[in-house]
Image (cartoon, rainbow, N blue to C red):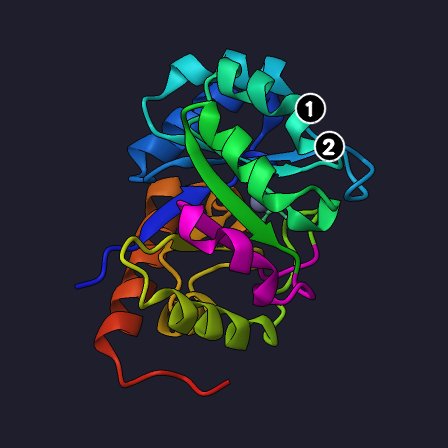
């Protein structure tokens, strides 16, 4: 059976006790931690910087991936790596030259990902598609947790999966935004490998149960009837 990873997004965690929220997610069976970095410019919200990442790094041995929703990702990429993130995901919509940006992030030694806003077509990935570890498909408009999934993006996940299938070393597809036990089926059937979930994990007092429900939804999708057409 296909292996699907679950990355809780700490955007929905209780920031007054971020460390224990992360260990809670780890005990619940998370595969990694998703760290949303926002600059109030690329997206209309502000979150955390390298200082906070450095302080939460020692609390868990899970991989941490930073989703950099910031206008100048290359300015801060090294700081986030030094703070201890295992991978960095940047947005092509920042206008940065993709080949050199991906090479520079690769040069920092960790994983490299690209994230696409809902309206960004997958063709923008073409120049770098074979150089990536992960591709994050935003299933909501970035900036806030707890939004409803945009169903139109499901077709894009499927097209991306088809595009990636022939590659010798295929980047993993992450889905981010409005992922919960209800919506998991459609994104998994469309080809997602990694579920990023904020509200569905940290909004539930029992994180173990929250992760189990996501895994059950994955199992149902993988054992159910063929692919969805929408
Ligand atoms: C949205 C962020 C997401 C967010 C998802 O801009 O990139 O990672 O935390 O939150 P939920 O799962 O609550 O939609
Ligand atoms: Zn995110």
Q: Residue at coordinates 54% horizontally, 29% vertically from top-left?
A: 104
Q: In the figure, 183 relative to 172: above or below?
A: below
Mark 1 to mark 2 CA distance (whole Å):
6 Å
Q: Give the range drawn in magenta.
A: 118-141
Q: Residue at coordinates 81% horizontally, 43% vertically from top-left?
A: 44
**Label 1: few (<14), some or many (≥20) within 10 Å?**
few
Find numbered disc 1 in the image and state the secondary structure of the residue it sits on.
helix
Q: Residue at coordinates 66% horizontally, 32% vertically from top-left?
A: 73
Q: Residue at coordinates 52% horizontally, 13% vertically from top-left?
A: 54
Q: In the figure, 131 relative to 118: above or below?
A: above
Q: Does the magenta stretch include residue 124?
A: yes
Left or right: residue 96 versus residue 85 is: right
Instruction: Kindly tell me whether mark 1's CB lies below 8 Å from ligand 2.
Output: no
Q: Disc number at residue 72? A: 2
List x then y, in percent, for residue 22.
43, 27
Examine the rendering and report whether any part of residue 48 can be seen: no
Q: 167 and 89: which one is in front?
A: 167
List x then y, in percent, for residue 215.
30, 57
List x then y, in percent, for residue 31.
32, 39
Quadrant location of ligand 2?
Answer: top right
Residue to which mark 1 is pinned: 75
Q: Which quarter of the figure has residue 119?
A: bottom right
Examine the rendering and report whether any part of residue 204 can be seen: yes
List x then y, in percent, for residue 132.
43, 46
Q: 174 and 107: which one is in front?
A: 107
Q: Which quarter of the figure has residue 168?
A: bottom left
- Name, please, the residue furthest toward the left: 1
Q: 99 and 48: which one is in front?
A: 99
Q: In the figure, 82 relative to 71: above or below?
A: above
């Amino acid at each position: 059976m296909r292996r699907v990873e679950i990355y809780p997004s700490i955007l929905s965690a209780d920031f007054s006790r971020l460390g224990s929220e992360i260990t809670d997610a780890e005990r619940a069976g998370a595969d990694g931690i998703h760290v949303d970095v926002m600059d109030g410019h690329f997206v209309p919200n502000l979150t955390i910087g390298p200082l906070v990442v450095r302080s939460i790094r020692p609390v868990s041995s899970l991989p941490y991936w930073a989703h950099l929703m910031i206008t100048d990702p290359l300015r801060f990429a090294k700081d986030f790596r030094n703070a201890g993130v295992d991978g960095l995901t940047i947005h092509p919509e920042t206008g940065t030259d993709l080949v050199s940006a991906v090479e520079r992030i690769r040069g920092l030694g960790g994983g490299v990902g690209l994230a696409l806003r809902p309206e960004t077509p997958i063709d923008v990935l073409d120049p770098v598609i074979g150089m990536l570890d992960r591709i994050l498909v935003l299933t909501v408009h970035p900036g806030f947790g707890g939004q409803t999934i945009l169903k139109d993006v499901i077709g894009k996940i499927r097209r991306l999966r088809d595009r990636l299938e022939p590659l010798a070393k295929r980047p993993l597809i992450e889905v981010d935004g409005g992922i919960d036990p209800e919506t998991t089926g459609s994104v998994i059937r469309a080809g997602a490998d990694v579920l990023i979930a904020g509200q569905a994990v940290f909004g539930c007092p029992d994180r173990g149960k929250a992760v189990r429900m996501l895994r059950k939804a994955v199992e149902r999708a993988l054992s159910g009837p063929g692919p969805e057409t929408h």
